[in-house]
């Protein structure tokens, strides 16, 4: 049976996540208001502009239903701006969900490397390195107890974390042809 995975569709590259889920025979639901979350087995918060997504999230009353989804053990995965929104602290005032005990630095790569691609080893992902696309990406500066680091750049910078069924990645797996991360997320949602 195919599970329903919600993709928060307020702003950003939700369509690309939807396309990725489609390749995995999974029903992707574009979540534009809280009622769209009915019956979803997991939620992806896409990349985009975290300030904009956060403001719209507040305006449409998403905080409570998203936190409730997390409390009921359903997987949630934030990519790039989504990672920022899941953080506890990003060093400036903007709406955050505080779902992951991490501090994040936005736009952490200087101008020259604003955007780049690199191959990453990711804990739990077998079959060789994962092609990771970074676009004005955030990085994780500190992780609290219980937060597992899944991947780092060569210089040690943290770019993927997990706490239980909550995931955050600095990069954009939906912009590559590699479905392994989405497949793992869908499998987790199926079991949750
Ligand atoms: N720079 C964006 C922010 O800080 C995130 C970029 C992205 O999601 N690709 O919100």
Image (cartoon, grey):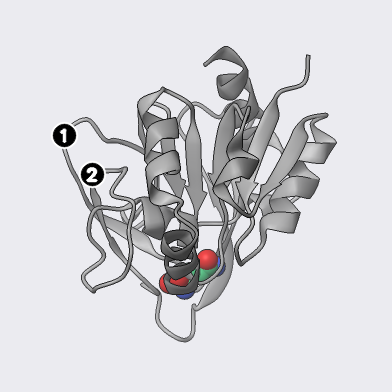
Q: Is mark 2 within 8 Å of ligand 1?
A: no
| 5 or 58: nearer the viewer | 58
What residue is rendered at 56% in x and 39% in y?
A: 43
User: Do residues under tags 1 and 2 come within 8 Å of each other at their CB atoms?
Assistant: yes
Q: Which residue does the numbered mark 1 point to in the structure image?
A: 145
Q: Nearer the viewer, mark 1 or mark 2?
A: 2
N-terminal of the pair, mark 1 or mark 2, is 2
Q: Quadrant of the N terminus?
A: top right
What residue is rendered at 74% in x and 56% in y?
A: 15
Q: Is residue 39 above or below residue 130?
A: above
What residue is rendered at 32% in x and 58% in y?
A: 96
Res 26 → quadrant: top right
Work out which residue is located at the far bottom of the displayed protein and give it. Answer: 111
The reply to whether residue 161 is in sight is no
Q: Is residue 41 left or right of residue 136?
A: right
Q: Is mark 1 within 8 Å of ligand 1?
A: no
Q: Is residue 50 left or right of residue 40?
A: left
Q: Position of residue 146 (x, y in %)?
A: 22, 30
SS assignment at label 2: loop
Q: Is residue 167 above or below residue 107?
A: above
Res 42 → quadrant: top right
SS assignment at label 1: loop
The reply to whether residue 188 is in sight is yes
Q: Position of residue 155 (x, y in %)?
A: 33, 58
Q: Is residue 93 left or right of residue 53?
A: left
User: Callout 1: few (<14), some (14-19), or many (20+) C-alpha neighbours within 10 Å?
Assistant: few
| 7 or 62: nearer the viewer | 62
User: Callout 2: few (<14), some (14-19), or many (20+) C-alpha neighbours within 10 Å?
Assistant: some
Dot label at residue 113 = none
Q: Which residue does the numbered mark 2 point to in the structure image?
A: 101
Q: Position of residue 158 (x, y in %)?
A: 34, 51
């Amino acid at each position: 049976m195919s599970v329903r995975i919600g993709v928060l569709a307020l702003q950003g590259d939700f369509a690309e996540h939807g396309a990725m889920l489609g390749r995995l025979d999974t029903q992707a639901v574009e979540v534009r208001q809280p009622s769209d979350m009915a019956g979803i087995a997991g939620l992806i918060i896409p990349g985009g502009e975290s300030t904009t997504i956060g403001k719209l999230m507040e305006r449409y009353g998403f905080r409570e239903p998203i936190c409730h989804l997390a409390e009921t053990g359903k997987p949630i995965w934030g990519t790039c701006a989504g990672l920022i929104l899941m953080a506890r602290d990003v060093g400036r005032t903007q709406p955050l969900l505080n779902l992951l005990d991490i501090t994040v630095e936005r736009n952490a790569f200087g101008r020259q490397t604003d955007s780049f691609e690199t191959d990453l080893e990711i804990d739990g992902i077998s079959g060789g390195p994962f092609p990771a696309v970074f676009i004005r990406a955030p990085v994780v500066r500190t992780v609290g107890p219980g937060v597992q680091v899944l991947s780092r750049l060569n210089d040690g910078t943290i770019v993927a974390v997990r706490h239980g069924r909550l995931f955050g990645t600095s990069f954009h797996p939906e912009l590559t042809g590699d479905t392994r991360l989405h497949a793992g997320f869908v499998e987790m949602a199926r079991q949750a």
